[in-house]
Image: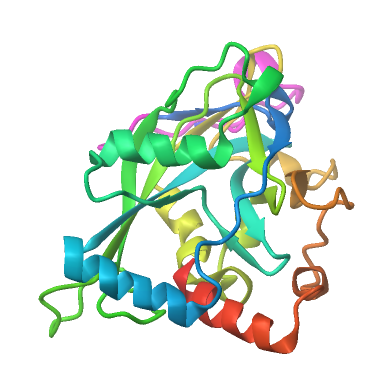
Amino acid sequence: MSTIPPNALQSERPPIIPLPFNANQPKTIRLYPLTNYTFGVKETQPEEDPSVMARLNRLDEHYAAHGMRRTCEGILVCHEYNHPHILMLQIANAFFKLPGDYLRPEDDEIEGFKARLDERLAPVGSLGEGEKPCDWQIGDCLAQWWRPNAETFMYPFVPAHITRPKECKKLYLIELPESKTLSVPKNMKLLAVPLFELYDNTQRYGPQLSAIPHLLSRYNFEFVDEDGNVVAATPNTDSAAGGPQPKVKHLAGGELDEDVDMNTDSGNQQGLSGQHRSAVNQEHGADN
């Protein structure tokens, strides 16, 4: 398989094409450039719980009334410089999470998930012209994470001694259309994070987010430019040729600062007291 399609090759020495190597491969995912999407902000969405303990207490109350809590989050993928980027939220300049939330007890899984995505990312006002409610293409379920008890840790399996987990979180692949308008609450930031930044980076992103490159490794990607032309395909090494390098990009929400420096964590910890930072990291370092 060629990294660069024949109509985009600029070398006089085309690559050697091996025998087919796509047995039992899922469908190829087409990724559109980050510049195809429009980003805005909307009203603040404050956190439901003032502390980690309050959140876990509410989980206990939910379990007693409705059974296991169901949570869905979306992996939204686009590309820049022919490298996949994941759209995710940053809250309180401290922790990261994927768009989505827990479902209401009466919600259907997919329709309820679409409604929760709308709450987080659907545009409002003039930005919403032409946008339809719940207009999301929900793809494969890529992972399930389980919370055995009312505690901060989640596991990608149900521990052997657990028969009634308190929460199950599913991560779904969201296939973005060629263009879309997204709005983020004012108290959050929407970031585009390259896959290589997430890979093996549990210290900063936690085990769930740092596992996303593993989850996406089963797919082949086609990278499309702004004119709709396929300019690269997996495997991709084009960005290592001395061109612009991918980095985390601040898209909307929060203070419009410069793009995040991936080599430092200082920006993520500013503005938090020591006690708040500890609670945030305790809850979301392992939970997101």
Q: Quadrant of residue 169?
A: bottom left
Name the residue at 31% across, 45% down.
141
Q: In the image, is residue 226 above or below residue 220?
A: above
Residue 189 point in image, percent of width and height: 71, 51
* Residue 197 appearing in the image: yes
Q: Quadrant of residue 74?
A: top left
Q: In the image, is residue 175 above or below residue 161?
A: above
Tell me how many marks there are. Answer: 0
Please tell me whether the stretch drawn in magenta is mainly helix, strand or loop.
Answer: loop
Residue 239 point in image, percent of width and height: 74, 43
* Residue farthest right in this picture: 258
**Magenta segment:** 2-27
Residue 85 appears left or right of 53? right
Q: How is the image coloured?
A: rainbow
* Residue 20 appearing in the image: no
Q: Nearer the viewer, residue 227 or 133?
A: 133
Name the residue at 59% across, 77% down.
280
Magenta-span inclusion, residue 246? no
Residue 56 point in image, percent of width and height: 38, 77
Residue 264 appears left or right of 208? right
Name the residue at 53% across, 77% down.
51
Q: Quadrant of residue 202?
A: bottom right
Magenta-span inclusion, residue 14? yes
Q: Nearer the viewer, residue 33 or 206?
A: 206
Residue 53 appears left or right of 245? left
Residue 193 point in image, percent of width and height: 66, 51
Name the residue at 65% across, 35% down.
183
Q: In the image, is residue 82 above or below residue 6?
A: below
